[in-house]
Each structure stands twice: as C-alpha cells, then as structure tokens.
Amino acid sequence: MIVACFGLTSAPAWGAALLGEALNSLQLDRVASGLTQPTDVVALPDGTLVITQRLGDVAVVRPDGSLSEAANHIAIVSLNAEQGLLGVVADVDFASDRQLYFYASAGANTEDKHKVLRVPFGTDDRLGDAITIIDKGLVGFLNHAGGGLIIHEHQLYVSVGDTGANATPPYNQLGTCLNSPNGKILRVNLDGSVPVDNPLANLTAVTGCKDRSAPLEPLPPDKRIYAWGLRNPFRFAIDAASGLLWIADVGESAKEEVDVGGIGSHFGWPFYEGTVHYSQAQQPFQPEGACLGISPPGPCVPPVFEYSHTGLRASVIGGPVLDACDWPAEFRARYLFGDNGSGEVWTLEMTPDRRSVVPGSLKPFAQMTGPASFRVGPDGSLYMVDVTSGDVYRVQPQKRLSDNCQLEPPDATGGGAGGMVDSSGDGGQGGQGGVGLGGNPLQTAPIGGDPAAPIQSGGEGGRSSDEESRPRNDSSCSCRFGGDGRAITALAHAILLLTMLRLRRRARPRSLLSGGERSA
C-alpha cells in the first residue's frame, strides 16, 4: 500500500534522518511510502508529485498529500538487474503542454533496450499515449543502465551506462567509443533530433568500436553524444551558474567519483577508475596517451572528488547543486550526493568558480536506507527517493527566507540545478592539484562514526597522459519533534537510527544500483 503524508516533519524508525547542520535548520517530511522500488520523482508546478517505480508503475501524489487512484504503468520488457523505469522529468513548458519524459527499459531486444518516452499527463492524473523520442542504440545487457534525465533550454540531457561487463582491469570500451551512446551523456532536442552544436555533430569519423571488446577504429559518430568516458552515470545535474555537468559516476571495484565538465569532456573511463590509471599493459586496447589518443582528442578530466569502497559504500548517487534562494546560506552553493549502498548523504562546498569543490568541505546531510534520486521542486524543496525503503522524502527550510523566491525553470522540472553547458565547461586545460592517493595525506571526514569517509581529489581539468596513478515498511507518518529539546531529541533519534540501519543493512542483499556486481 502506498501512503502519502504531507506536512509531518520526522521519519519513523527505518526511515531517513537529517544530520549535522541540516538537523537544526531544515525540516524532513516523508511524503509517500509503501512504494515498490521507487527510482525517481518530479514535482510539477502545482505541487503534484509523479513518482516512477522500477517495475513500471507510476504513482501520483496530489498537492494536498492524497494519493491519486489513477493506475498508471509503463511497460518494461525483459527486466533484468538494474533495468526498469528509471527516470522522469517534466517539460519546462509543462504548464501549457503537460508533457513528461521517462527513461525506460522498454525495448524488446538488447540492442535497443533503453528508450526515452514523451507522455502527456492529463488533469485527471492519467498518462496518455507515449511517443518514443529516443529508441535506437541504447544497448542494455544486465546492468549499468543509466537513467538520468534533465531538460534545459528546451533540450534533453540523458545519462546512459556502459552496459556492464564488469572486470578489473576493465575491458568494456563503450564509454570511449564515440559511435555508441553507452557510457555517455547525450543531448537531443525535445523531438529527439540532434542539436547542431553537439560536439560530434559535424564530424564524419571518430574513435569507435563495433562491440564493447572489439578493436578501436575510425567509425561514424553518434551525434547525440555530449560528453563521454563514463561507466554508469546514473544521476547527474547541471549547475545553472557555471553551466557545467556534475556527474556521479558509479565505480567498478575501488572508487566512486564525482566529475565536473562540459561539452566534449572525456571523464576517463575505462582508462581510469577515479584517480586510478590502468596501464597499457593491463589494457592492450588503450591508445597512447589514453584520452589524448582518442579522436577527437583531449586530456582525461579527473574527478573533483572520489571515495573508496569501505564498509557498505559502493554506489554513488548524484544530486543537485543546492542553490534555492530561500534556503539558509550554509547550504547554498553546495553539491549534494549520497551512496546507495551505505545510505549516507553528504554535501560538498563548490569553489568560487564553481568548477571544483573546496578541500575538507565534506559535511553529513542525512542518513537513508538506499537513496536513488535527489530532485529540486518548483518551490526549492529537495526531494529524496529511497529505492530500498520505498519512501519519498521532502526537505525544506524550517523557516523560509523569502516568500517571493523564484527558481530557474530547470529546477522547476525536477532536474536539479540547470544551466546551459557550453565549451567553457571542457576540462582540457589541466586540473588543480588536490588531496588524494599516492602517499599524500588523506583528508577524511567521519560520517556517522565511520572513520573511512570519502576523500577529496583533484580539481576539474585534465590528467597527464603518462601517469599510472594520481592523487587525486512502516506505512505510518510520525510527528514533529516538539518543544525546546527538539534538536537534542532529534540527534538521539539520528544516532539510534544510524546504529539500527547499519545492523539491518549488513544482512540485506546487494542493491539493484550496486557498483561492484560481477554480471556479464
């Protein structure tokens, strides 16, 4: 049973809890529960929530908190591992055209498994007939499906995984094969056509491959590609102020990473996992100079942040840049992200140029069971989707700073922070040094009592071509903590919750979004 419950401020046991500064100045509401593997949410202009569930069902929660009785479903074909109904976003003109876009594993065959569908959403809360916007070439084996959607300035950005074939060192080359959409961020117009300024739009031949383990060779490009060199960019955002992509790329066996870059950026996979460089001896297919040997060439863009697989940490989930104009100042210009395995949620302070993160700025934000998506609504509220517990949460300031705060249209579509990405985002000029591996002292920030916290890595920019490794279901809703002792009571609740969650998660099976599975 799905339960919608707006207006209540604390999650019950086994739910989510705010931590650190968020506990004292933000308010947490559980707005829906009892869902079956919810994957994404979009908050419409009137406050209606549309929530995707992995098996294909679409739940609708009205602005008053009631659950719509409309039975909406998008057919998922040959469901395996991480496939399913994975993403949703609303058109920036939703108020007039009422169009939603979905990322679904709806193809009948492996070669064209993943689709992007445009579906009208009626005033009766019912989905209309779907039109397929992207239907060719998004290969889907068992895992690394991608599924992120953002609309900005009437263009659709789509994150697609590299299809899996996990191995260390990696042999799946699709992330760097520019004739394939897998392991990429795509950009298309809302009718599926290719923007004329896409980085490969005017090229006739690029580095490609006919299969994920076939030799690299010159082939015609997939002109939908916007950025490449990714493993499984399940969630990403676009920063409105800088126009840069902020991508959480799920790692293989060692590293989870946050990448920042723009048009034509190569983020290093499969030659790099975070700051770890696989050698040509380990990867005979790797060209001289790694990313510099790909056509079109450019240095590999290193992560601005990475962390190791310690404890239950195994699958980074990216969120938005927190810039809602009526949030407390300590949360603005901070990038929010979490880990699906451990359930931890953090924020990082952006550098003044918004191209990297400030060393030592990692802060705890919340504890969940298994985060799958973070979205910003029209009023600046943050929505957190928990695929493991079946809950969706809303986070907002306890006291709004302004009653006249208006967000940029990309935030209103549920796509996180938005902004046009242009050539200024290309990370090919060399990154600033950062704290990382290779004997340098590690900057750690204990989260929830765990000393093995994520580490800071290098700034946005390029890697040198010769480096081997570089530092770099309870369905009820609970009540508000009351009285002057609210913060102390909430802190005790959070500590108890963290302890119980750790014991509970150690006994549960690997998540569908886990990064370290060994499937074909």
Image (cartoon, rainbow, N blue to C red):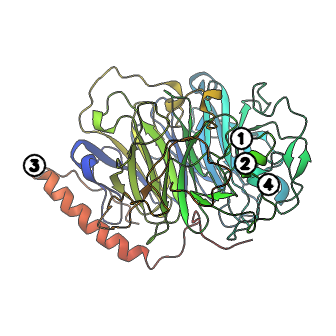
Determine the CA span between mark 1 and mark 3: 58 Å
Type of the residue with mark 2: Cys
Q: Secondary structure at mark 4?
A: loop
- Residue at the bottom extreme of this rendering: 507
Label at residue 41 = none
Q: Which residue is mark 2?
A: 291
At x 67%, y 71%, the residue is 168
Q: Are marks 2 and 4 in contact (CB under 8 Å)?
A: no
Residue 48 makes an appearance in the image = yes
**Does 381 sit left or right of 19 as displayed?**
right
Circle 4 Cα neighbour tier, 10 Å, few/some/many (<14 / 14–19 / ≥20): some
- Disc 1 and disc 3 in contact, CB within 8 angstroms: no
Earlier-in-chain disc, 2 versus 1? 2
Query: Where's residue 199, x and y in %?
Result: 75, 32
- Residue 287, which numbered label? 4
Marks 2/4: CA distance? 8 Å
Question: In terms of depth relative to the viewer, which is nearer, 424 or 491?
Answer: 424
Type of residue at label 4?
Answer: Pro
Q: CA distance from mark 1 to mark 4?
A: 12 Å
User: Distance of mark 3 from mark 4, alpha carbons?
Assistant: 64 Å
Identify the disc placed on residue 298.
1
Indicate whether 465 appears above or below 254: above
> Dot 3 corresponds to which residue?
483
Q: Disc 3 residue type?
A: Gly
Q: Residue at x 27, y 43 (%)?
A: 26
Callout 1–callout 4 Cβ contact below 8 Å = no
Q: Is residue 79 above or below residue 377?
A: below
Q: Tell me what residue is drawn at x 34 percent, y 59 percent.
A: 476
Query: What's the distance in space between the residues labelled 2 and 3, CA to CA?
Result: 58 Å
